[in-house]
């Protein structure tokens, strides 16, 4: 089969690899759509833990083969990939904290992922979908679950005010979940006008560009001492530092942006956090018990009732063969984009 393989830092190729055969307890998904995640770009630009590796964890397709012990009823069913493969045995798995599993794998970062014609998956890693759901919408289920998980961790309640820092893919999903769950005010910030325009289209009431306005001042005009919930989805240290001044006393900040590990925060940050009694909450992936969690079932329900808008989030569509070119362009900052969908069946 054809697949896109990360060979080394900034080296990615489209080539022939062995087609996977599902073993006992496994099944195979014929991929219909895969979306590029920012974390895939990061693995390409900064390097990754292992090579060679087929990246890709935002996928949908049709189950076309089952291994021993797996019901043939799965054949022909549409599904999305649930990329986390927890052990289901360790202390954290038993608590339902699957992303803290002592020995997890992850499809598309620790084992072969979905930039390919086929993916081999354990039975528990398929999220079965109705046949009439568009494959490209289904490929965007995973990033939506991350946003939904952030709001669960921040204990978001209808009627609260929220600020989304960064209108990339997670930020745009956050804006939508805040709208769906009944936020009283949704403020979003980003330095790219295009991202802000889309954020407004999918539900943000106020869109602020920090390169043009004083965000702290604007937020003060809108919500006084700060928002109830601030969602950090940029991974930029200065943005994280500023997040405290945007949060009301006793408010919460949920962190999902991956920060550069060679930077540090001044301890005045902790001092300010203590004085305002602000909670700082980490977020990693999108899982809760029972696996994969309400984040997944709620996303599917929102897709089916039309409240989650995936179309507006998709900026580009390419055949899978174009992936190396696309990664090169994005790695060189030559391609502004929102979600990019790759199709393994289209001919380049
Ligand atoms: Zn992702
Ligand atoms: Zn575990």
Image: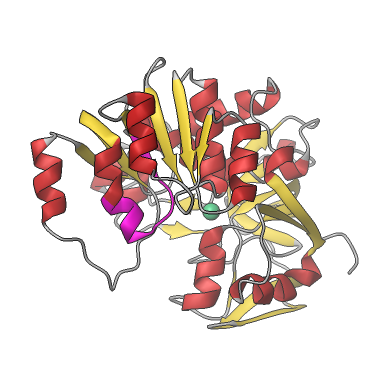
- Where the N terminus falls, by quadrant? bottom right
Q: In this view, does 43 lie to the left or right of 103?
A: right
Residue for point 72% across, 77% down = 17
Could one spot residue 7 in this view of the protein?
Answer: yes
Q: Is residue 124 above or below residue 206?
A: below
Q: Give the range drawn in magenta.
A: 230-241
- Where the C terminus falls, by quadrant? bottom right
Pinpoint residue 85: horizontal percent, then vertical percent.
Answer: 46, 52
Residue for point 41% across, 35% down = 163
Pinpoint residue 235: horizontal percent, then vertical percent.
Answer: 39, 57
Pinpoint residue 344: horizontal percent, then vertical percent.
Answer: 80, 61
Q: Is residue 294 left or right of residue 334?
A: left
Question: Where, by quadrant of the figure, is residue 223 drawn?
Answer: top left
Residue for point 51% across, 62% down = 39
**Residue 234 counted in the magenta span:** yes
Q: Nearer the viewer, residue 336 or 309?
A: 336
Question: Where, by quadrant of the figure, is residue 328 drawn?
Answer: bottom right
Could one spot residue 78 in this view of the protein?
Answer: no
Q: In this view, does 11 lie above or below 72?
A: below
Question: Where, by quadrant of the figure, is residue 332 drawn?
Answer: bottom right
**Residue 193 counted in the magenta span:** no
Residue for point 67% across, 72% down = 334
Q: In this view, does 282 lie to the left or right of 145?
A: left
């Amino acid at each position: 089969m054809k697949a896109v393989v990360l060979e080394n830092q900034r080296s990615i190729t489209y080539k022939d690899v062995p087609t996977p055969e599902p073993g006992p307890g496994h099944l195979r998904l014929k991929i219909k759509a895969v979306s590029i995640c920012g974390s895939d770009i990061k693995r390409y630009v900064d390097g990754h833990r292992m090579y060679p590796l087929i990246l890709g964890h935002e996928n949908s397709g049709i189950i076309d083969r089952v291994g021993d012990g797996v019901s043939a009823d799965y054949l022909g069913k549409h599904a999305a990939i649930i990329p986390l493969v927890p052990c289901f045995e360790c202390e954290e798995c038993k608590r339902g904290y699957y992303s803290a599993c002592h020995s997890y794998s992850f499809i598309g970062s620790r084992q072969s992922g979905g930039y390919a014609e086929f993916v081999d998956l354990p039975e528990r890693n398929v999220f079965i979908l109705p046949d009439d759901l568009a494959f490209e919408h289904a490929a965007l289920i995973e990033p939506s679950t991350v946003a939904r998980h952030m709001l669960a961790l921040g204990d978001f309640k209808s009627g609260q005010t929220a600020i989304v820092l960064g209108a990339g893919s997670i930020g745009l999903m956050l804006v939508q979940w805040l709208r769906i769950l009944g936020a009283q005010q949704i403020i979003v910030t980003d330095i790219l006008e295009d991202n802000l325009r889309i954020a407004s289209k999918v539900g943000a009431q106020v869109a602020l560009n920090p390169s043009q306005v004083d965000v702290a001042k604007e937020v003060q005009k809108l919500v006084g001492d700060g928002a109830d919930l601030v969602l950090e989805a940029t991974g930029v240290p200065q943005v994280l530092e500023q997040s405290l001044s945007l949060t009301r006393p006793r408010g919460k900040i949920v962190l999902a942006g991956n920060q550069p590990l060679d930077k540090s925060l001044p301890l005045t940050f902790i001092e300010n956090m203590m004085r305002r009694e602000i909670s700082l909450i980490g977020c990693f992936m999108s899982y809760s018990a029972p696996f994969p969690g309400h984040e997944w079932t709620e996303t599917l329900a929102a897709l089916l009732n039309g409240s989650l808008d995936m179309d507006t989030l998709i900026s580009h569509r390419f055949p899978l063969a174009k992936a190396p070119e696309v990664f090169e362009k994005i790695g060189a900052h030559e391609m502004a984009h929102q979600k990019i969908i790759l199709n393994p069946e289209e001919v380049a």
